Image (cartoon, rainbow, N blue to C red):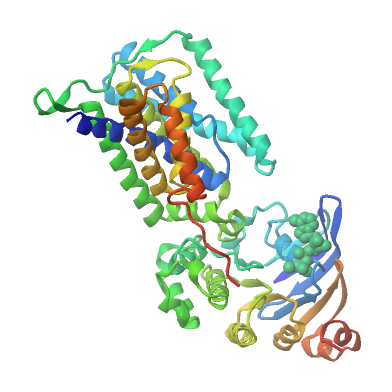
Amino acid sequence: MSFLNNVITGVSLGSIYAIIALGYTMVYGIAKMLNFAHGDIIMVGAYMCFFAMGSFSLPPAAGVLLAVVVCTVLGIVIERLAYKPLRSAPSLAVLITAIGVSYLLQNSAQLLWGADTKTFRPLVEGSLVLVPDQLSISYVAVLSIACCVVVMIALTLFTGQTKMGKAMRACSEDKAAAQLMGIDVNATISMTFAIGSALAAVAGVLMCSAYPVLSPTTGSMPGIRAFTAAVFGGIGSVPGALLGGILLGVIETFAKAYISTALSDAVVFAVLIIVLLVKPAGLMGKYVPEKV
Amino acid sequence: MLNVNDINVYYGAIHAIKGVSFQVNDGEVVTLIGANGAGKSTILNTVCGLLHSRTGSIEFLGQNLGGIPAHKLVERGLAHVPEGRRIFQHMSVEENLEMGAYTQARASIEPNLERVYEQFPRLKERRKQVAGTLSGGEQQMLAMGRGLMSNPKLLMLDEPSMGLAPILVEQIFDIIKRLHQAGTTILLVEQNARMALSVADRGYVLETGKIVATGTGNELLQDEAVKKAYLGG
Ligand SMILES: Nc1ncnc2c1ncn2[C@@H]1O[C@H](COP(=O)(O)OP(=O)(O)O)[C@@H](O)[C@H]1O
Ligand SMILES: [Mg+2]
């Protein structure tokens, strides 16, 4: 039974990683940059929900909505101010800027909201008992898995069926060619940041509901792990982010349960390195050879 | 239709296009020929707004295109089929064509698709196939079909025959002839000068960023200097 409990914990944690990883992967796919500040958007989202539910006693749904709105706007603003001017700069300059934005967000949070750790009130409490005293699944875990499923279905429909979603895929393949089709590449990149940041807000709220501590650095570790998940699954690939996120959550949970809590990150990265040695593009990374 | 007047284009310090002027009139097929590196692609990329000229002007249908971003030119009737095809490899054939019609009203997409499939029956057979798995010739047809999906008034083709087997080159030029007969205005860039001049009403010869000769397709085919430099003597 403890095995099943671990699977449930792993999958629900992995669902949250997957939601974060989608943001990394979509932004990477279109802007070809690692948005290092993505993890800190998670933290901002969690703070928004924390204040909405705590200071203003709003219902959880309103807290989530506020988090999503603030993060979406923040994502668009960051892209416009920090990344857009560097569209044709070397990728190292963009990476360093993204790291700078990450610190800026963390330090601003510290300044505005203090460095102390806050106790986050989960969106939902209690758990669903499957086998009394042996197997249960917390409602937060149920919610995380459900959110992940909904997000995946919505994104798959969006990128596969809608005109805007297809334009996004076109931009991520070839920006110049996309412009020749009449697609506004800047608007499309903005939209991608908006979607990624909205997802980060959702993930932040879920993450803090599952592990209810909140501080200005709350976003960085999940951010790095989710980034790992995105690489694991194949950066740029939406199903890859899902697969990578879930696998990472499960591996991490199992490593903690059966190997050592302290070594869990080392185990995760060891698996990542092995996967990348065998499949350099990640589990679902795409590679289409050029034709003549 | 298109009036390019004294453009100078630079890549950083490299002066790639040096005071080029030319016209394309309604219904014409006009070709720019020149060796590799002469500046043909640079000119087309400047016309379609991906690159910018420091001087002069580009007028399309009587309007100056200066300052208009590339993605706004499609709805004005300019389609550019770039060098190397640049199709969306991970998208299906039909999705590529839909992207070509990005600026079009939803209602016009179906009839346009039918028209393109009529021109290129091969694409219809493979409409669900991922574009990256098409053969080189099919990819070129897709790139041209995608360009036609926006109902362009002017179609610019950058080396459509590049890298294709001779029989496919024939096919591509047949298609260009058919488009011409149907009234499409075409600006064609080619290294295959003989083929290009044989389908073109008029041509310009480009050498290291400058136009060095111009005339009708036949005149240029007979021109001694052109023969020597571009038609293998
Ligand atoms: N992105 C670029 N950066 C710098 N120089 C370039 C670039 N693209 C083309 N050039 C230079 O501009 C000139 C014209 O190139 P291009 O227009 O591609 O020629 P063509 O299409 O006739 O083969 C060449 O000398 C080429 O080296
Ligand atoms: Mg060229």
> What x and y, as percent, mark residue B210?
87, 68
> What x and y, as percent, mark residue A259?
35, 27
Classify B225 as above or below B139. Answer: below
In the picture, measured across the screen, residue A169 lies left or right of residue A253, that is right
Q: Nearer the viewer, residue B226 or A23?
A: A23
Q: Nearer the viewer, residue B78 or B134?
A: B134
Q: At 66% across and 71% down in the image, what residue appears?
A: B156
Q: Quadrant of ligand 1?
A: bottom right
Q: Nearer the viewer, residue A25 or B9?
A: A25
In the picture, measured across the screen, residue B224 lies left or right of residue B231, that is right
Q: Nearer the viewer, residue B41 or A226?
A: A226
* Residue furthest left as drawn: A132
Classify B176 as above or below B49. Answer: below
> What x and y, as percent, mark residue B5?
81, 65
Classify B230 as above or below A118. Answer: below
> What x and y, as percent, mark residue A232?
45, 42
In the picture, measured across the screen, residue B164 lies left or right of residue A131, that is right
The answer to whether residue B40 of the structure is visible from this angle is: no
Q: At 87% across and 67% down in the image, what residue appears?
A: B208
The N terminus of chain A: image quadrant = top left
